Image (spheres, rainbow, N blue to C red):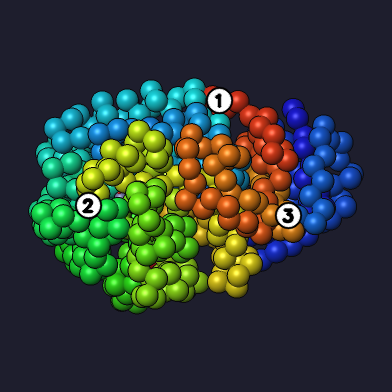
Amino acid sequence: MTRVLVHGGEVVSSTGTTPTDVLVEDERIVALLAPGTGDLFAVDERIDAAGCYVLPGGVDVHTHMEMPFGGTQASDTFETGTRAAAFGGTTTIVDFAVQRTGEDVEEALARWHAKAEGNCAVDYGFHMILGGVDEASLKAMDALVAHEGISSFKLFMAYPGVFYSDDGQILRAMQRATGNGATIMMHAENGTAIDVLVQQALAAGHTDPVWHGLTRPAALEGEAVNRAIALAEVAGGTPLYVVHVSASQALERIAAARDEGRNVFAETCPQYLYLTLEDHLGAPGFEGAKYACSTPLRSKHEPHARDLWRGLRTDDLAVVSTDHCPFCFNDQKTLGLGDFSKIPNGLGLVEHRMDLVHQGVVDGNLSLQRWVETCATTPARMFGMYPKKGVVAPGSDADLVVYDPRATTTVSARTHHMNLDHSAFEGAVLQGQVRTVLSRGRTIVDRGTYLGAKGHGRYVRRGLSQYLR
Ligand code: DUC
Ligand code: ZN
Ligand code: ZN
């Protein structure tokens, strides 16, 4: 048995901040001790956390490692992406296995296991994207919930011809989820209307990246969220989790549904809290392609970012995830030169989520407790991993982050660990720095040095959401 003591730090949880020593035996936390009393135990390793926060490892429930998309593939593999996550204080990811139309769901899942197994630096789970809702895939949902540790299914109201489900298919999947207890995750944008706007823009000669955003108006995110909420209600109150909320109009409908007591939940992502359509997607030349993601960045002349921060404070937005889906500028984003609709959609952020949201604490947008709650505790509860993940408590996995709030992090493609040739936050200086990261009791990052190993990360079989109202 190996014993580790993390001492002298302040444990931050969703309910408060307390000076506490944390005793770890092998892979688990075994005791929370009054400061100094940890000295009574014989330990193999002492980690000095004086002046630092001690947090539950971050839980990023929205990543796309090596996902085939837009004629290419997301540039981070499970190996590079989970190592980058570790550097950023994220010790669990939930990635999206993809079933394409007509494909066998269980075979698709097996392919995703083959990509991840033996390659991950941190623990990982899977959601399943249903690219084709039919009798076979509906039946497979039950099997995945019952036997495979997969309790959440993502559907798309966008991307006709690729991942798109029509309202009838969505209703059928939601009805099935009402029966088996799964959560339906929704990419809520009106894809068929967006496709018309895209064709019209291209026909008018508008090819620059900014048109990616201009053809995906906020109203069509609000409309799709509204429809998804109505369909979930008709399906019998299926838990609905709206992914990557970027628009005030979407948040407004989510807040209204929650005020009515519905099982409606949502996440946002750091890009929507900080980046804008004009300054980033609208950058000169083809530079804006780096910022093409869907849902898109929103206008700085509208109060989207301010509303999203408020939603995080009020719990109308429960989670911050990344939608990590990186594509290099060279050879990948450039597929969209001369046609914005061919830019592979996605940003690489898995390494910087904890720092970017901590900056929100420094800026007065969020409390310290809410930082931990939105980035670790709630995602673990929402997706059936709590209290194994998301909390510093006896019995929980010893996934711990020693976080120095006084040091700074400078974001740059030159120093980040993602397999990505640029950074959406290039040059940003963020207050706070990940110092030491433990994954199931093993130190995997310390002061910028990687001490982990590929294959350390294990598959997490998830239960049903523990966050229902
Ligand atoms: N949005 C993105 O930006 N990338 C991948 C898929 C998605 O929905
Ligand atoms: Zn999506
Ligand atoms: Zn996504």
Q: Decide: marks 3, 2 in contact (CB < 8 A)?
A: no
Q: Which residue is mark 3?
A: 407
Which element type, helix, strand or loop, lies under badge 2? loop
Find residue 51 and report its image quarter.
bottom right
Instruction: Name the amino acid type tagged 2.
Output: Thr
At 22% from the left and 46% from the top, the residue drawn is 339
Mark 1 or 3, nearer chain start = 3
Q: Would you name the residue on which mark 2 appears?
A: 207
Residue 155 position in % (x across, y down): 24, 49
> Real-space Cα distance between discs 1 and 3?
28 Å
Picture quarter with the C terminus: bottom left
According to the picture, the residue beneath numbered tag 1 turns out to be 454
Task: Name the mark nearer the viewer: 1 or 3.
Answer: 3
**Relative to 61, is 98 above or below?**
above
At label 1, the amino acid type is Lys
What residue is shown at x 74% (from left), y 27% (from top)?
1
Please report whichever mark, 1 or 2, sits nearer to the chain's N-terminal start: 2
